[in-house]
Image: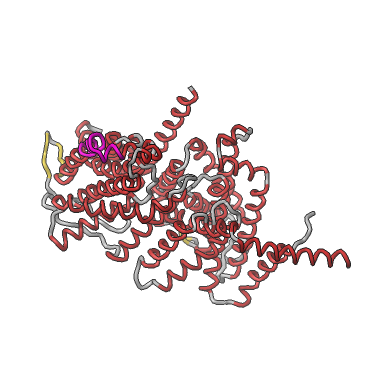
Amino acid sequence: MSAGVLLQAIINGIMIGGIYALVGMSLNMIFGVMKIVNFCQGELLMVSMYVTYMLYSYCGLDPFIAIPLVAVIMFIIGAVIQVSLITRSIKDDGDQNVLFLTCCLGIFLSNLALLLFKSDYRTVNSMFADQIVQVAGMNISVPKLVGFLILCVTTALIFLMLKKTKLGKQIRATSQNPVGAQVTGIKIKAVYACTYGIGAAIAGIAGACLMSYYYVFPAVGNTYGTRSFIVVTMGGLGSTIGACLGGIALGVMETVGSSVVGSAFKDTLVFLAFILVLVVKENLNIRKKRG
Amino acid sequence: MKRLSIRHILAALGVLLLSLVPLVIDTPYILGIFVTTFYIGCCTLAWSILGGLTGQISLGHAGFMGLGSYISAILLNNLGMSPWISMIISFVVVGLIAAILLSPCFVLSGAYFTLVTIAFTEAFRNLFINWEYAGGGQGILIPLKKSGIVTMRWVSKVPYYYISLIMVILFFAILVWIDRSKLGYALKTIREDEDTAHAVGINSFKYKFIATFISAGMIAVVGVFYANYIGYINPDLFKNSNSLNYLMPAIIGGIGSVAGPLLGAGILTPLSEWLNSALSAISGLNLVVYAAIVIAVILFRPNGIMGWFNRSNLKKAINKKLDAIDEKLFKRGKEA
């Protein structure tokens, strides 16, 4: 493999990784901060893609312009899901029920999409679609590049939000010790609803970016749901920057890997790498604990 | 030997009644629903050993079932080997594959274990889609060359009915036996608190290995049955949604109880088949309703039907009645 091909693969990987990073960050809010095992993250992404699609086809909004609106809509959807379903199913004994609930919610959402939109593949005509810029002989697709820039902005905003704002501090406090947070007067139910909402809103941003160059169909969430867990695990639970880097690493691994083992087996490679990372990490943790 | 009680008699009556069904009903569609219910019940029971008793929630059982189906289909098509032999081969091979692959992951807790099982299944699916020898993405057709007991192929559904019925009874018996054995107590201790299990000298690695072996092996046997019953398999078998199909009955029935998974399968499979046919005009609607029902059960009966029943007064009343009948029967037996 020549250096040029490798470099192109790495650049493509970083661009694809941008979306993985965004989805990973959205899961990170829910799984990492709130410890809610959210198995319907991919479906939230799917919903946001359909929202973007509807905004485009009924209001003529370009996906990139629609991002704030999609984020707000997804925030509301997420907060409603949290308040109506997830708070009720959280029990002290383990996370089993939440896991099952979100799994079923995933089935529910993807089949609702099938019911409303049929199984057709739908696309939108974004203003940057099919445009390519050339940097030092490397081709970069403009929608992916814009998506990547949006990722950088979102990461910075979330980081600042968690560190500086009152809500961010409340979220972190609730994440570290829910009982203690409650004692100090934080309304943890509202914080939970906000956190899930923010998670869904980030998925909305990811969905709008993805929609600008990809097509949407009811099962589109499958790929991204599992990958979001990979990203969060690789980047470290609860770390925003980690999720961002993890997503980019996953994207690069995928594109470079597929030019090494062939695109057919790239999924196998990704999953095996994930298992390896997870197992090695956990074993190191255990060793550390034992001293 | 244990005394014969009214509960045993009732169970035997139930089995007898079920075994008479094909004599009364000869619609293939209805029989098909029965067979599906039985084999989904088998899958759920197999899942319960790892998920229910040991508390390791696996979403990868579709993968182990798929491996079993593929082993059977390839052995039958290429070597002409009887599915009965490949049932044994699948049990051992798939059980070992699963236990060995998952053994490094036993240290993972909760959702991470679930994620690893999903990752393995997806990796398998990707492999099988691209593996030409195993039919690639198109899958394998098992042509009906010779029907009979050796090839496990019939046109009629009645033999499949009896095989699946026997299988589900056998699986249930295995689960009951494991639940009451030393193995079962060890597994349940691990489920409740792994540190305590270590403290009382239970080697959790060894028992998780055994549980994975049995659980995956059993579902692989169901896979062999499935391949020969449907006659066509493809990599879709490895899909995540299939794993959920085997897990949902356990949720509905009550994870951790022995009868729960079977009860759940008995309720959910006919329900899903009925929804499938009743709402087939609009694609997706059946699964929307199905998922909504399961979500409602998770929200309002988080311990499942058996979990709720075990705590209810109804169970006490029924037990009291049965005990009274038992005593009567027992006394009569003494006098005679």
Q: List x then y, in percent, for residue A170.
A: 30, 39
Q: Looking at the image, which residue sits at the far top?
A: A291
Q: Is residue A158 left or right of residue B291?
A: left
Tell me what residue is drawn at x 30 percent, y 34 percent: A242
Q: Which residues are magenta?
A: A155-170
Q: List x then y, in percent, for residue B50.
A: 55, 47
Tell me what residue is drawn at x 27 percent, y 62 percent: A120
Tell me what residue is drawn at x 12 percent, y 44 percent: A132
Tell me what residue is drawn at x 61 percent, y 65 percent: B148
Q: Looking at the image, which residue sits at the far right?
A: B336
Query: Would you say residue A156 sits in the magenta stretch?
Result: yes
Query: Would you say residue A91 sits in the magenta stretch?
Result: no
Q: Is residue A92 visible?
A: yes
Q: List x then y, in percent, for residue B143.
A: 50, 63
Q: Front-most of B16 and B219? A: B16
- Image quarter where the N terminus of chain A lies is top left
Q: Front-most of A83 and B174? A: A83
Q: Quadrant of residue B326?
A: bottom right
Q: List x then y, in percent, for residue B236.
A: 41, 56
> Image height check: is A275 above or below A42?
above
Scheme of image coloration: secondary structure
Q: Is residue A1 left or right of residue B20?
A: left
Q: Is residue B102 left or right of residue B203?
A: left
Q: Is residue A22 left or right of residue A101?
A: left
